[in-house]
């Protein structure tokens, strides 16, 4: 019964993984046969300023986008889990952006973020004069300023939280109702209820989502960086490792070098997940005591 | 200041679109333990929840110790509730569960812990304070829930079927402890149950609820000896009271005058006197007995046996000592003393004063 799954796993996951692993120690341009170079690729990566920029970009992106995404999804789930007027449409709206195909989603943001004609800056300059905001400052140059462009990529990632939102919504709804009624009888404030009841009870789910989002944060920076900012503005402000690997492999045909970059990212991910996993286990042990 | 611990004035409530309480009036004396008894769906839990403020009141007023709390949120009513499921916080130790209500009210941690220990000691769960609910048995959880309810010294205790999740042996034991606890604390309490034994044992007074209306309010003795309606008569007592039309299959000895046909006669299984042909073979059926019947089935429960007897087209239940039980198929004489008979109006189901 497992055969089709095992076959798929071997052909689609394990095979490419082993090949990537092997290619990382070679030079390969798709035309000549791979040439063994040992750790040469890794030594070159360590000295490559573009790779270092991409690495830092990726880490900063994950460090900011992942917690923000979780926070927003949690906030929405806690706001919208009740039966209330318009809660249903609001839940749909929260999930919907995740259903838009990635490329279309990127193109949509290209328009939204247009510094002059995009609706975001139109709103920001509302009430201001000469294209400035009310406070007399220049509106963000989303696609041309390095810092603003990084912010734009993070901003784009904050709306595709549909899946996280649904999981947290289900987790919140699974919590026993009488516990909340008891808290009401004890006159616990909303803050007390959140801090002493909801967060501790929902923490295991939050932990798992955190691990998952860290792994996925590499993926959801790729399409926006490719479609919206094209890895720029200079100097490589929104070049993340997936885009770096993509360019290196498919534009510069340096497959071995790209494989090495991918491998570095994989190791970093594994390390991050391992650290979180240990923290989670410690938390759980503490609570099951 | 009034003498009332809790007053409901013409209270109505609905669940979704169904009305579950109909202009209910109820007064619980201060320090009294009132048991609300009724079958499922009678509105018992709704009654409790609207006193607690967890369910909206459609009309009427709720007063706790003379204070109108109808518009107050649950936390401002100073009531404690023990839930059927106990509603313990799974992530907190027993101690932290008990101190929760104090801590959110900004009692210092040290003071809260001292009070929690005292409360836990008074319900016998002082040795469980370091454990989490997942490591406690049903009975132990219940004690923790009780300690949490009484640590805050509320004006009113609400118990929502707190014994229903315990096994029978523990239920009897905990029932006794609850009664003793109430006697010691003297706090006004409302206890909801569908278990008539629990109601009869625990209550100072019992309110029998049916379809959102009060059937009878009275002491356990009154409920047992002078049930106000056919419903109360049948609901309280196990097996249920026998009910036959007046002038029907059995005419109680000493009946002062023939009752009219629109009355129902009720008598408990304990009041039925049986005689068997085996016991008095010479002159069976005895003229002293009111009716003759055939034993259909006999259930033996330890010392007691319940005999189900077919008398013309009615089945009567009789409680007899297990040692003197008849066998199925035996012809028996059935008798009832007039003093043991309750008379009800057949139309309204209400009790008719004995003539």
Image (cartoon, rainbow, N blue to C red):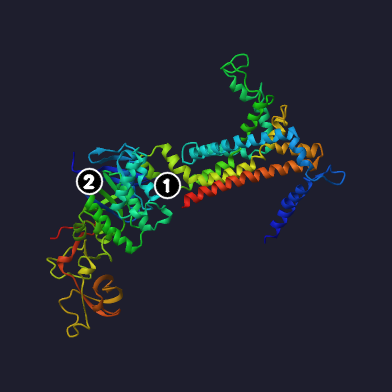
Label placed on residue B27: 2
Residue at figure coordinates x 60%, y 36% from the top left = A63
Q: Are marks 1 and 2 on the same chain?
A: no
Residue under mark 1: which chain is it in?
A
| x 56%, y 39%: residue | A70
Quarter of the view holding residue A138: top right
Q: Callout 1: 10 Å neighbours few (<14), some, many (20+)?
A: few
Q: Quadrant of residue A47?
A: top right
- Which quarter of the rendered picture does the N terminus of chain A lie within? bottom right
**Given the image, what chain letter belongs to the residue carrying mark 2?**
B
Compared to B105, does B43 lie above or below? below
Secondary structure beneath disc 2?
Answer: strand
Residue B203 located left or right of residue B287: right
* Residue A40: x %, y % from top left: 79, 42
Residue that sits furthest to the right in the current view: A32
Residue B114 location in percent, x, y?
31, 45
> Which of these two is toward me, A253 or A23?
A23
Q: CA distance from mark 1 to mark 2?
A: 29 Å
Nearer to us in this view, B128 or B284? B128
Residue A25 horizontal/vertical position (percent): 79, 46
Circle 1 sits on which residue?
A: A177
Residue B202 screen position, x and y as percent: 25, 56
Is disc 2 surrounded by few (<14), some (14 to 19) or many (20+) residues within 10 Å?
A: some
Residue B194 in view:
yes
- Please indicate, yes or no, whether residue B53 appears anywhere in the rendered image: no
Asked whether, in this view, residue A77 is left or right of residue A267, the answer is left
Q: Are marks 1 and 2 in contact (CB under 8 Å)?
A: no
Check disc 1 and report its element: helix, strand or loop. helix
> Quadrant location of residue B222?
bottom left
Up the image or down, B128 lies above or below A120; here it is: below
- Residue found farthest to the bottom: B282
């Amino acid at each position: 019964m497992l055969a089709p799954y095992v076959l798929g796993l071997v052909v689609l996951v394990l095979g490419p993984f082993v090949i990537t692993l092997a290619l990382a120690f070679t030079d390969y341009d798709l035309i000549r046969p791979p040439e063994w170079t040992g750790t040469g690729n890794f030594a070159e990566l360590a000295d490559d300023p573009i790779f270092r920029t991409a690495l830092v970009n990726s880490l900063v992106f994950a460090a900011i986008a992942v917690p923000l995404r979780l926070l927003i999804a949690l906030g929405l789930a806690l706001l919208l889990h009740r039966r209330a007027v318009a809660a249903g449409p609001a839940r749909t709206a929260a999930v919907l952006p995740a259903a838009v195909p990635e490329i279309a989603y990127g193109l949509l943001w290209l328009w939204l973020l247009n510094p002059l004609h995009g609706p975001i800056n139109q709103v920001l300059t509302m009430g201001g004069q000469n294209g400035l905001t009310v406070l007399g400052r220049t509106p963000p140059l989303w696609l041309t300023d390095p810092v603003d462009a990084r912010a734009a990529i993070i901003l784009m990632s904050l709306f595709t939280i549909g899946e996280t939102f649904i999981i947290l919504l289900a987790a919140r709804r699974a919590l026993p109702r009488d516990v909340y009624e008891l808290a009401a009888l004890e006159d616990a404030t909303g803050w007390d209820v959140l801090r002493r009841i909801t967060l501790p009870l929902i923490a295991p789910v939050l932990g798992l989502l955190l691990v998952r989002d860290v792994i996925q944060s590499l993926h959801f920076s790729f399409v926006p960086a490719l479609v919206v900012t094209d890895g720029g503005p200079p100097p490589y402000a929104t070049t993340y490792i997936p885009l770096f690997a993509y360019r290196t492999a498919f534009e510069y045909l340096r497959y071995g070098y790209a494989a090495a970059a991918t491998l570095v990212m994989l190791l970093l991910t594994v390390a991050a997940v391992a650290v979180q996993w240990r923290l989670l286990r410690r938390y759980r042990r503490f609570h099951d005591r | 200041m009034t003498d009332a611990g809790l007053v409901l004035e013409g209270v109505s409530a609905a669940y979704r679109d169904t009305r579950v309480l109909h202009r209910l009036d109820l007064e619980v004396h201060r320090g009294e333990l009132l048991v609300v008894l009724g079958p499922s769906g009678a509105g018992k839990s709704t009654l409790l929840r609207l006193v607690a403020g967890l369910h909206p009141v459609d009309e009427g007023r709720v007063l706790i110790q003379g204070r109108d709390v109808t518009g107050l949120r649950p936390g401002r009513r100073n009531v404690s509730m023990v839930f059927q499921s106990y509603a313990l916080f799974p992530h907190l130790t027993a101690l932290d569960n008990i101190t929760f209500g104090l801590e959110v009210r900004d009692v210092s941690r040290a003071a809260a812990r001292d009070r929690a220990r005292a409360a836990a000691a008074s319900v016998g769960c002082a040795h469980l304070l370091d454990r989490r609910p997942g490591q406690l048995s049903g009975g132990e959880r219940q004690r923790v829930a009780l300690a949490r309810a009484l640590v805050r010294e509320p004006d009113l205790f609400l118990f929502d079927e707190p014994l229903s999740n315990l096994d029978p042996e523990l239920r009897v034991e905990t029932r006794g402890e609850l009664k003793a606890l109430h006697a010691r604390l003297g706090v006004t309490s409302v206890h909801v149950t569908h278990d008539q034994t629990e109601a009869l044992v625990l209550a100072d007074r019992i309110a029998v609820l049916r379809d959102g209306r009060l059937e009878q309010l009275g002491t356990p003795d009154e409920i047992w000896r002078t049930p106000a309606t056919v419903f109360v008569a049948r609901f309280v007592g196990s097996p249920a009271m026998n009910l036959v039309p007046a002038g029907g299959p059995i005419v109680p000895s000493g009946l002062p005058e023939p009752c009219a046909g629109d009355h129902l006669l009720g008598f408990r299984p304990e009041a039925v006197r049986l005689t068997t042909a085996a016991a008095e073979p010479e002159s069976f059926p005895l003229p002293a007995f009111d009716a003759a019947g055939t034993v259909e089935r006999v259930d033996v429960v330890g010392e007691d046996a319940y005999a189900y007897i077919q008398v013309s087209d009615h089945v009567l239940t009789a409680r007899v000592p297990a040692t003197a039980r008849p066998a199925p198929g035996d012809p028996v004489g059935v008798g009832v003393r007039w003093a043991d008979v309750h008379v009800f109006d057949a139309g309204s189901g209400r009790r008719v004063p004995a003539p």
